[in-house]
Image (spheres, rainbow, N blue to C red):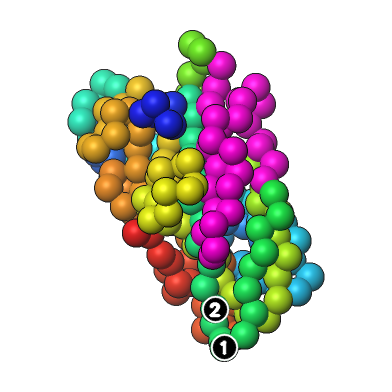
Amino acid sequence: MKSSLLLLGVVGILMAAAPARGQYIYMDVNGDALCTGAELLTSSTTTVDVYLDTNHDANGTLKTCEANSSQPLDIFGYDILFTTGRDGPYGGVVYTGWSNAMSGFALLNPFTVAGEDAGVGYTAPLGTILPPGRYKLGTLQVAVTGHPTLSFRGESTNPSIPSPVTGFGSTCEATWYANTITLGTDFSDNCGTGGALDVQATTWGKIKLVYR
């Protein structure tokens, strides 16, 4: 990751791994470690878990590094940018904190709130690189009123937030940020929450997603 971030082919009769552009970052409200139409924010919601699958897309298809298939889609750090919206005319999300769930990772970019956006970043100890797979990055603490939604921003639009992107540090070469696989540039699969009025959200693909 940049100074401000830290920033298998098993073919045959089996399914072959497709090249990158398929990482998946998502939110879980109800504790089932998935993102579905059930991820609805209500006044009783106080926490939102965030997961990242570094080498599968939202459909579970195995992915390899697009730049160089010999480079693993491993992880040694992450940054996340959140943004909130509304399903109705009232309500919102107050960000109250972030709890890192990656063992041994240290704070890199402090949890910062700016208007309807927030960001945070953590990094592994020097020399520590975790293998490809699905990880629970951490938990966002929130206070909810009305019928808001939560989603990810790909890149920050507010210079007061130290985390510049939603992405993760990896041995795999990235497009714009060296070794930082970035949402909206290197991959697109992501899943946020719906609001309590969002009764038509029945699959992850029908939830309103935002990355900028």
Front residue of 33/148: it is 148
SS state under label 2: strand
Local crowd at mark 1 within 10 Å, few (<14), some, or many (≥20)? few
Percent coordinates x, y for residue 8 in the rendering = 32, 27
In the image, which disc is placed on residue 97?
Answer: none
Q: Could you tell me which residue is drawn at 66 percent across and 58 percent down? A: 95
* Horizontal side of residue 104 vs 178, given as left or right: right
Q: Nearer the viewer, residue 177 or 116?
A: 116
Q: Is residue 124 left or right of residue 10?
A: right
Q: CA distance from mark 2 to mark 1?
A: 7 Å
Instruction: Count up the numbered dots.
Output: 2
Q: Residue at x 67, y 36 (%)?
A: 101
Above or below: residue 40 compared with residue 211: below
Q: Quadrant of the N terminus?
A: top left
Residue 172 screen position, x and y as percent: 31, 27
Residue type indicated by callout 1 = Pro
Label 2 crowd bin: few (<14), some (14–19), many (20+), radius 10 Å: some
Q: Nearer the viewer, residue 181 or 1?
A: 1
Mark 1 lies on residue: 89
In front: 49, or 6?
A: 6
Q: Which residues are magenta?
A: 98-125
Image quadrant containing the C terminus: bottom left
Taking the image as shown, residue 47 lies to the left or right of residue 117, namely right
Q: Is residue 111 magenta?
A: yes
Give yes or no for contact between labels 2 and 1 (Cβ–Cβ under 8 Å).
yes
- Please, which residue is most extreme toward the bottom here? 89
SS type, badge 1: strand
**Numbered circle sitting on residue 86:** 2
Q: Amino acid at mark 2?
A: Arg
